[in-house]
Image: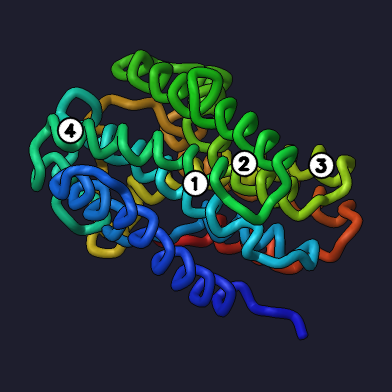
Amino acid sequence: MTIQLNDFLVSRKQIIEKAMPEYIEKLQAPKTLKDAMQYSLEAGGKRLRPILVLALLHTYKQTEKLGIATACAVEMIHTYSLIHDDLPCMDDDDLRRGKPTNHKVFGEAMAVLAGDGLLTQSFSLIVNDPYPSSENKLRVVSELVKAAGAEGMVGGQVADMEGEAKNLTLEELQYIHENKTAKLLGFSIISGAILARAPEEDIEKLRKYAYHLGIAFQIRDDILDIEGNEDVIGKPVGSDTTNEKTTYPSILTMQGAKEKLNDHIDHAKTILNSLSVHSNLLVQMCDLIANRDH
């Protein structure tokens, strides 16, 4: 029987949200630090990145316990990036997912340290995971370094900051979001495929799928920053305009941005049709990202 994405999202989100606090609670660390780390992990969110890891294992009919630790690790990295992104020296946001941002509750210094703690703990989860082979864990760590570090998310964040109050070209904007957003989303897909022992040919195709899905995710974000409902998305709309950021709608117009979004989704679906396995969950993920309201 084919599982529906919504059922998969609900059930796997519960697994991830049960596992993450257990990893933090085990740490021999100051209670304030653990509380700050836990606060942002428990702030909610779609959990798309960790769920994508498990979706790949499900797609290739492998036990999902191979990916629980890696799934939690990618969510910790995503959460650390949000904590730091919200700081006054970055985007200076007071709300995240409808709750006060970490630094508003614990102070700026503790927010920085909570992010640091989540980042480093994510690597510990992967390397100490007893289920995958050592070779696959090494491959996953290597992929994570590229996706989350200077050649990926961190580099994209720098380009994003340096691009404020400038009229960026579409190519420059594409670079920012390929690195800031798409590569970490892509890591979820590639790590899941590695842990599932997918054929190498499929893994390379999934890199292209991940790229299109990640850019589509960001375009939808830009659209929601203009058309979204603040109560639904959990943060003020219009922050990109306030921060003088170039967005897809500002370059392409709103209609053009929506057309570009659909183009990336169509490309992603075409790639899925060429995989060695049926990928119903991943097709449904395309539609979720294209139509999400938060």
- Neighbor class of circle 3 (other Cα within 10 Å; few <14, some 14-19, many 20+) is some
- Neighbor class of circle 4 (other Cα within 10 Å; few <14, some 14-19, many 20+) is some
Which label sits on residue 157? none
Which tag, 3 or 1, sits closer to the chain's start? 1
Q: Are marks 3 and 2 in contact (CB under 8 Å)?
A: no
Residue with the mark numbered 4:
92
Which label sits on residue 186? 2
- Numbered disc in front, either 1 or 2: 1
Q: Residue at x 57, y 50 (%)?
A: 129
Residue with the mark numbered 3:
205
- Numbered disc in front, either 2 or 4: 2
Name the element at disc 4.
loop
Q: Label 1 to label 2, Cα distance in Å? A: 19 Å
Does residue 255 appear anywhere in the picture? no
Which tag, 1 or 2, sits closer to the chain's start? 1
Residue 247, position in %: x, y?
A: 42, 32
Residue with the mark numbered 1:
125
Q: Residue at x 40, y 68 (%)?
A: 18
Q: Nearer the viewer, residue 166 or 60?
A: 60
Above or below — where is 261 with respect to 147?
below
